[in-house]
Amino acid sequence: MALLQQAAELAREDCERAQAMAHELSLRLRAAEDRAEKLQSQVKQLEDKVSHAEHWLARVYHEIDNRFFKQERSESQRAAS
């Protein structure tokens, strides 16, 4: 009977350890999910900033092209005529 009681006690302790580990892993998983969500939000913000910067770079490029290079090409075509 003592052996059976000892086996039951060991099984209970194993079960408690497994439950504690499952709880700890659950907390870690939730923390990792929270971090992943924050990182995804940061990625979205950075993608928006990149898109905005690309828009402005394209605008600056076209403005420079229109003001300087097209004018320069027009002048060289007139000179060649």
Image (tube, rainbow, N blue to C red):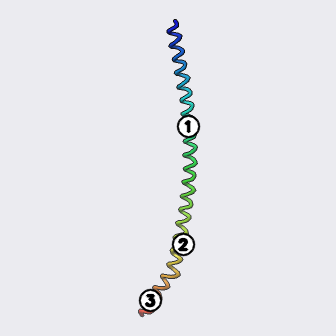
Q: Give the number of the mark in front: 1 or 3.
A: 1
**Tag 1–tag 2 contact (CB < 8 Å):** no
Which residue appears at 57% of the width and 51% of the height?
Answer: 41
**Quadrant of the rendered structure where residue 23 is?**
top right
Which residue appears at 53% of the width and 81% of the height?
Answer: 67
Q: Determine crowd level at label 1: few under 14, some 14-19, many 20+ residues with C-alpha closer than 10 A.
A: few
**Up/down of 36 relative to 81, above or below:** above
Residue hosting label 1: 28
Q: CA distance from mark 3 to mark 2?
A: 25 Å
Q: What residue type is disc 3 on?
A: Ser
**Tag 3–tag 2 contact (CB < 8 Å):** no
Specify the quadrant that holds the C terminus: bottom left
**Residue 71 on image: x %, y %:** 50, 85
Q: Depth check: 55 or 12 in front?
A: 12
**Residue 2 on image: x %, y %:** 52, 7
* Disc number for residue 59: 2
Residue hosting label 3: 76
Q: CA distance from mark 1 to mark 3?
A: 69 Å
**Up/down of 8 relative to 27, above or below:** above
Q: Depth check: 56 or 28 in front?
A: 28
Question: What element does badge 2 sit on?
Answer: helix
